[in-house]
Image (cartoon, rainbow, N blue to C red):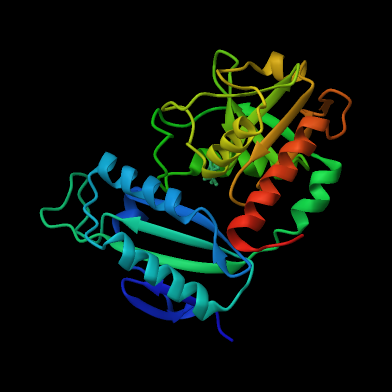
Amino acid sequence: MPQLAYVDGRITALRDATVHVEDRGLQFADALYEVAAVMNGELLDWEPHLARLRRNCAAIFIDFPMTDAALTAQAKRLVAANGHKDALLYLQLSRGVAKRDHSFPSAPRASLIMTVRRFDFAQRIGQQKTGVGVITVNDMRWQRVDMKTTGLLANVLAKQDAKAAGAFEAWMVSADGIVREGGSTNAYIVKDGAIITHPLSAHILPGIARATLLRLARDAQMTVIERPFSLDEALAADEALLTSTTAPLLPVVRIDGRPVGSGTPGPVAGRLAALVWDEIARQTGWRR
Ligand SMILES: Cc1ncc(COP(=O)(O)O)c(C=O)c1O
């Protein structure tokens, strides 16, 4: 069965799906995106993804007239048409097509594209047992990374550095030594049983997996502290973790080649992972 994509209302074969050369997403990264997990054929945490997209539309003044119900129906239609039980839904909304000029066009019509790619979530179970390594890089991004825009060049370069170093992720560190987040994941440390993560601000993306993790941890009476932490603190932590849609929870066991705690996944990561997979099973019926 051919891979299918959605382009402004039409589902077509992925290989034939194209956008206009004057799409502002292409020329200015004047576009927003979301990546949602499809597990056991069901969209995970879809409402929070929609809510984040709507918030970002308002923040950058993209007028997207499609209702949430219509967008949900189109997304589900594409997921069903592609037929993968475990996949990632990619959704990108640009300000539309217009003659190249930085300021907004006078009558923009937002353009929406979506793709669905098969994705192996079960690989995360194995990685959870061994843990993963991260490297650190300077956070070179602009000052509104809370908005999920397609302007991801700094993240691309950071993640390429991680790949070249054989690491899973690159943690982006501010000029004053604060660990912000990973190139495509949120970052946490554990000290004396407390889960510590950067507070929501313009400096991090408000991850959907982050929100889920913090809710589950608090519901389980675990201590969660939302405050900035430094790279030095991370190196002296008992445990470290990361989360994202594509990696619901992974223990971080090495930072720049140095072991975190014992250098193996710790008990807090194990407990959190169990909570996260139970929540996924509750929402989607997905089982390891
Ligand atoms: C910079 C950044 N931080 C965090 C995340 C995790 O966000 P989510 O949990 O919504 O996938 C992402 C996801 O792509 C990201 O790009």
Q: Position of residue 145 (x, y in %)?
A: 43, 34
Name the one closer to the observer, 48 or 232: 48
Q: Is residue 130 visible?
A: yes
Q: Position of residue 237 (x, y in %)?
A: 76, 19
Does 118 sit above or below residue 152?
Answer: below
Q: Position of residue 129 (x, y in %)?
A: 85, 45
Residue at x-position 45% and y-position 71%:
76
Name the one closer to the observer, 162 or 261: 261
Residue at x-position 15% and y-position 53%:
105
Residue at x-position 31% and y-position 71%:
8
Q: Position of residue 275 (x, y in %)?
A: 69, 43
Q: Is residue 168 visible?
A: no
Q: Is residue 265 left or right of residue 39?
A: right
If the picture is divided into quarters, which one holds ligand 1? top right
Name the one closer to the observer, 190 or 171: 190
Does 190 sit above or below residue 109?
Answer: above
